[in-house]
Every structure is written in C-alpha cells, then in structure tokens.
Amino acid sequence: MTGTVAAWIVRRRPYGDKPVQADGQTYLCGSIGGNALAVASVLGSASDPRAHTLAGTLVATQWTDGGWNCDENGLGRRSSFHETLATAWGLHEYAKATGDHAARASADRAVELFLEHRLLFSLGSGSRRREAGRAHRPLSGEVINPTWLQLRYPSYWHYDILRVLQILARMGKLDDPRTNDALDELERRRLPDGRWAPDARWWNTPGSATYQEAVDWGEPGEPNEMITLHALQILHAAGRA
C-alpha cells in the first residue's frame, strides 16, 4: 500500500501543472499535493523520499500571507482558502509522522490565515464575543463566500466550515476563540433529531457527465451519517459535546 501511494504521488504530479512564477509568488495547486501528502502520511508513506520532496515543494511555495493559489488570473490577490486548506492538512500529517519542523511551521502559518478571518469573514468585519447560551445567534460579519456555510460531503478540495473545523480539530486548534463563530454556525445547523444534513453536494451519481462518484454519499436535506459523525467529533474536540 505504501509503495502504491508513493508511486501515485510521482505519477500524478500532485501539485498540479507546472508551477508558474509571477509577482514574486509561485502559482500551483497546493490542494492536490496537500491531499496526496496527507493520505501518504496517514497510510505510512511519510518516510518515502518522494513524500519528502512533495512536502519540501509545498513549504517552498507558500505565499507570504500563509497560503497557496493556482489561479494565475488572480495576480496580486491573496491566496486561495480552497488551495490552502488541504495543503495545511497534508503538511500537518507529514509533520506529525516525521517530526519535520518546517512542515509543522508551514501548516501553522496556513492555519493562521484562516483564523485571522475567523474562518469565514472578510478582514475588517465586526467581531463579536460568544455569550453563554447564545450558540444559535446569527453570524455577525461579512461572510467571504456564502457557500462556505453549506454542509457537503465529501468536500474534495473545497473549503467549508465542516472541513476547516475538522482539520483544525486534528491540529488541536479549536481552543482558539476565533473559531467560535464557525462552531456556533455548525451547532445552529443541527437538526431537531440531533443529526446534520447536507445542504448540497459536489458529486454526481454514476452516469452523469461530470464529477461522477461510485459511492452514494446521501441526498441534500436528508440526515447524513458522515456529516453527523464529523460534526460530533468537531464539537467534542471543541468541548461542546
């Protein structure tokens, strides 16, 4: 299994197409490499030299704001939350498996990008303190992208509150008060029966023209086992369940 994962890393060139240099930044699809590195590390391939090379590439191409981006049309703009989330996860799992200090520092820098936005909001949006007994209070602030509030599973390379909270839980970062708004929103979306349901999905059923999935992950609006499992794990890690 470990050899198969390492071979896939090289064969698929998981950082995307050839990196583009512009404006002093490197444009590459960090999410592809991040997901590959995370899976390789979890499955025991972190010691493979090819995983080490991939981790080094991701660390070396991190933007000054802490993230990554592969949109060449976004020159001069900030890095992408979508590209950064999976990359942070991959570097965290690699550092956890190997003790690599550079990978750990890089993952922490990436997480700080999310935290300075309280995971959801444009910089400069008004913040609020979470009050006891007010977990279901509506969000306050300008949400960068409303689709980030939607629950979907699997997330693949997409950024949303469930996925970012899940990765922050794995990294032991949910004690940061800047996660409170997203945690409040996750609690607010709990169904009366105690479960959670997807709002939409990124995948299509077999036979569709694009984004086919072999697994039926559940229909939007219906209670979902995987989303419920992850939501409960997140709230437990945050001391809310």
Image (cartoon, rainbow, N blue to C red):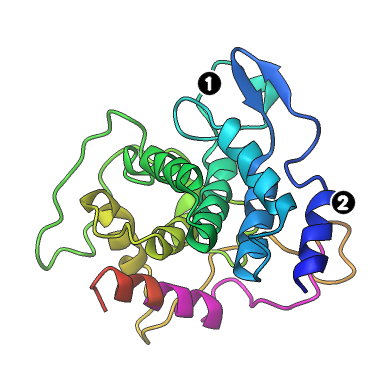
- Looking at this view, is 105 or 33 the one in front? 105
- Looking at this view, is 225 or 33 the one in front? 33
Mark 1, secondary structure of its residue: loop
Q: Is residue 172 magenta?
A: no
State whether residue 111 is above or below residue 96. above
- Looking at this view, is 111 or 222 the one in front? 111
The disc at residue 77 is: 1
Q: Quadrant of the N terminus?
A: bottom right
Where residue 21 appears, as percent x and y from the top left, is 69, 18
Question: Label 2: which residue?
Answer: 11
Mark 2, secondary structure of its residue: helix
| Magenta-tinted stretch | 212-232
Where residue 54 appears, as percent x and y from the top left, is 68, 45
89 left or right, relative to 6: left
Where residue 79 appears, as percent x and y from the top left, is 53, 30
Where residue 19 appears, as percent x and y from the top left, is 74, 28
Q: Amino acid at mark 2?
A: Arg
Q: Main secondary structure of the magenta part?
A: loop
Q: Amino acid at mark 1?
A: Arg
